[in-house]
Image (cartoon, rainbow, N blue to C red):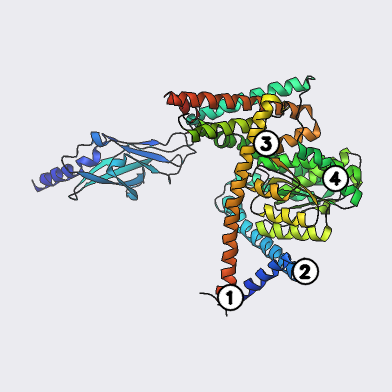
Amino acid sequence: MKTLILVIIITFLLLPICAFGGVSAIDTPNDDGESITIIWNPDSIPSNNLKLTRVKIERRTSSESGWEEIGVAPFSQRTFIDDAADDGIDYVYRLLFTGENGKALIYRTEAVHSSAQIFNTKRINVLIGIIICIFVLLYYIYRSQKGRQFYVRPIPGLQAVEEAVGRATELGKPVLYSAGRGNMQRVATIASMTVLSSVAEKTAEYNIPLIFPNNDAVVTAVAQEVVYDAYAKTGHPDRYKEDDIFYLTDSQFGYAAAVDGIMLRRKPATNLFMGTFEAESLILAETGNSIGAIQIAGTDSTIQLSFFIVACDYVLIGEEYFAASGYLSQDPMILGSLKGQDMLKVVVGVLILLGALAVTFGFTGFLDIFSIG
Amino acid sequence: MDIGITIAAILTLAIYSFLYKDNPFYKTAEHILLGVSVGYFVVITITNTLIPKLFIPIFIEGKLIYIIPGVLGLMMFLRFHRRSAQFSRIPLSIIIGVGAGAAIPAYMQAQLLAQIKATMLPLTNLSNIIIIAAVLTVLVFFYFSREHKGVMGFGAKAGIYFLMLFFGSTFGYTVMARVSLLIGRMQFLLHNWLGLIN
């Protein structure tokens, strides 16, 4: 009889643990794995006037017996994300709902495991945007390669590059080129390599030294390849000096101090600052100004542009800098992509106008197209 | 007096001596800064990258797939061997390709879609109208495949004025931040080092 009573008591105590209604755990959607979302619906949990205030979340793997606490959340939060899960391992979650009087309800979820998703379906608009951009660019590149001539308006800063290199030749002084502090993953650094190639072709032809101090070892390696190729292309590979394309340090101000020193000691006639720049921009440009070098800067770092404008002779502002490669090389492919970018700017302008009008007249749903999940 | 503070103060003055002209004190400080920073970043690379992201996965966790990036990294050193130098271009091309590829969706999100959405403002007040006008005219300024004449010329000119307003304000704002850095350095010299001010 005692055993029967004990069994009934234990069964009564464990009953809530077996409950699943209103609580679930799912693999967090649209992520790169290692995350499970636990969901509870306050309306589906019979609180019996317990006035539930918080939830303690515990977990264990299917094979373990002990529970591990992973967090506490307010009852009203409805979800909790366990971002410390290992992919492919089945986890069971236990939720202890606690009321103001200290009494608790215990719920348990089905076993679930996390995994990474290949596509983030909330970012379909990004994919569509990329496809449209690629299509437009490829179309204009195709037209350009078929012989269509695209006009590029004069960009004073780029017209001055030839003049600046010529000045260095007349003075018999080197050209100093800096790609700033960007690593090779940055678009501005990739664009800088294209400009560097055009500049290197000119320095090779005029036989003047091209100094390229750098603060990223990978960029240095790429720059050495680019400059050597440019020298070889002009038929003067013998004029290439690998020691002039060199790595200094990763430190921002260490780099600035060293480039300043190089400017003062080697006195370049021309300084070209093309790439991503940060707080060192004014230090470099002011020093270059003090030695009387002609200076041309181009960057997508909007805040640093103002410093370059006050201290440099010519500045390529943002997009002008990205147009530089097409302008300097007159490569049909780059000119075609430049035309394609212009068409995309028209599309962007029209979309902005349409969006502004839509929002003005209360059609806010139009904005959702541009929301990123 | 703390020897560390004294060394830092002397190096600070040595760097400031550049304001007069290039001199041996500046050169010394410059070379110390370069040497120390390179040494520091070598250690950081070993402890934060090579050990946790290459050696531990391969030798302790047995994740042999990590040998591939390890080999690609080693291939960079082929640059020093004239005959094999061409193979160092393989990891470089992977870095550039992956970098550009990864940058495209990030730019599409942050620089295009998010910016377009943020500019779609109701035309109900002057501030919003100015913002939209500024964005559109700046877009006209950055239109390269047509000469800036007539309406285009007017739009581009308005665009460059908006840009200059932006540059002027960022210049003033950043200079203020730089002045506060100078004040911090002066406090270090006069308070921490010399103890002349409280």
- Badge 1: chain ID: B
Is disc 2 placed on a helix, strand or loop?
Answer: loop
How far is the residue under mark 1 from the one under mark 4? 47 Å
| Amino acid type assigned to the residue bearing label 1 in the image | Trp
Q: Residues within 10 Å of mark 3 (few under 14, many from 20)?
A: some
How far is the residue under mark 1 from the one under mark 3? 47 Å
Q: Residues within 10 Å of mark 2 (few under 14, many from 20)?
A: few
| Amino acid type assigned to the residue bearing label 4 in the image | Val
Q: Are marks 3 and 2 in contact (CB under 8 Å)?
A: no
Q: Are marks 1 and 2 in contact (CB under 8 Å)?
A: no
Is disc 3 placed on a helix, strand or loop?
Answer: helix
Residue at 62% x, 25% y: name it. Answer: A346
Q: Which mark is residue B23?
A: 2
Q: Which mark is residue A319?
A: 3
How far is the residue under mark 4 from the one under mark 3? 23 Å
Q: Residues within 10 Å of mark 4 (few under 14, many from 20)?
A: many
Residue at 56% x, 65% y: name it. Answer: B184
B1 w.r.t. A105: above or below? below
Q: Disc 4 marks which residue?
A: A165
B14 w.r.t. A189: above or below? below
How far is the residue under mark 1 from the one under mark 2? 23 Å
Residue at 86% x, 50% y: name it. Answer: A209
The tag earlier along the polypeptide, 1 or 2, is: 2
Q: Disc 1 marks which residue?
A: B193
Q: Are marks 1 and 3 in contact (CB under 8 Å)?
A: no
| Amino acid type assigned to the residue bearing label 3 in the image | Glu
